[in-house]
Image (cartoon, helix red, strand yellow):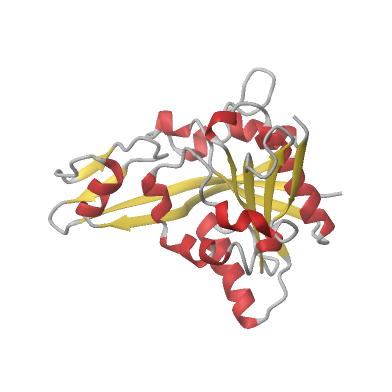
Amino acid sequence: MALQITTLAERPEFASTLWDMDHTWREFMLNDPIADLFYPVATTTYADCALVADDDAEPGRLVARAFMIPYVAGGSELPDDGWDGVIRSGRLARERGDRPDAVSALEITVRRDLQGTGLSSKMLAAMRHHAAGQGFAELVAPVRPNLKHHESHTPMSEYAFRTRPDGLPHDAWLRVHVRAGGKIVKVAPRSMVIAGTLAEWRKWTGLPFDRTGDVEVPGALTPVHCDVEHDHAVYVEPNVWVSHPLT
């Protein structure tokens, strides 16, 4: 496969099909309200922060995509609100005309039929290269460990730092980041917060949501808390901050 990775700004023809790529994201994950500050303008305002990839076997058809957002860190440590925090900071910086001093990865998505082929590593390398080319000394990432959903009751503070005998992370996606030169820094305990009525959660998951308490939702990294009396359920997802020094 001869892979071509560019920014969306360089290949705007991908804008109309960017969201058509077959993926494995669960529906509830697509209902984070903070994400609405980024994705509706991802193909315009942030086209220079979006990477798109195709190959010579199917030129013009996406095989992977990736997104980053510049934001204002102001010397502060990586925020506990992870994904939501950097999107909010990045959008506020744009609105206020502030100069970003940091950049965060947001997403790498590989087409469903090509997952497990090493494309995620190549997209991560491209993100690092692009961030360095923009003058940033570090790329940070609120990483969503891809095996954590099998252990939804395990605290992320325990899971994130679990290693194999060779010293690499237990989690496969964290392993990709570390092999690429990243360093696990800390947990972002409330990286993404998704709240909805019980009817909305039933629609998103196909589960009954008819009892107050924790609900195990396929694909969720932690249980979703359901409150029947007050007709809502809330998912608070922890992520893992990884720092990629860029040289």
Residue 159 appears in the rendering:
yes
Residue 142: x percent and y percent? 58, 49
Q: Residue furthest top?
A: 165
Q: Is residue 234 left or right of residue 94?
A: left
Screen quadrant of the N terminus? top right
Relative vertical location of residue 143 with respect to residue 12 in this rendering, above or below = above
Residue located at (82% from left, 54% from top): 132
Q: Is residue 59 left or right of residue 234?
A: right
Residue 81 appears in the rendering:
no
Q: Residue furthest right?
A: 247
Relative vertical location of residue 52 with respect to residue 176 in this rendering, above or below = below
Residue 62: x percent and y percent? 62, 43
Residue 109: x percent and y percent? 58, 42
Residue located at (45% from left, 42% from top): 25
Residue in the foreground of this view, choosing between 46 and 148:
46
Residue in the foreground of this view, choosing between 183 and 107:
107
Residue located at (42% from left, 39% from top): 221
Residue located at (15% from left, 52% from top): 228
Residue in the foreground of this view, choosing between 118 and 11:
11
Query: In the rendered image, which quarter is residue 16 located in?
Result: bottom right
Total marks shown come to 0
Residue 78: x percent and y percent? 62, 57
Relative vertical location of residue 15 with respect to residue 124 in this rendering, above or below = below
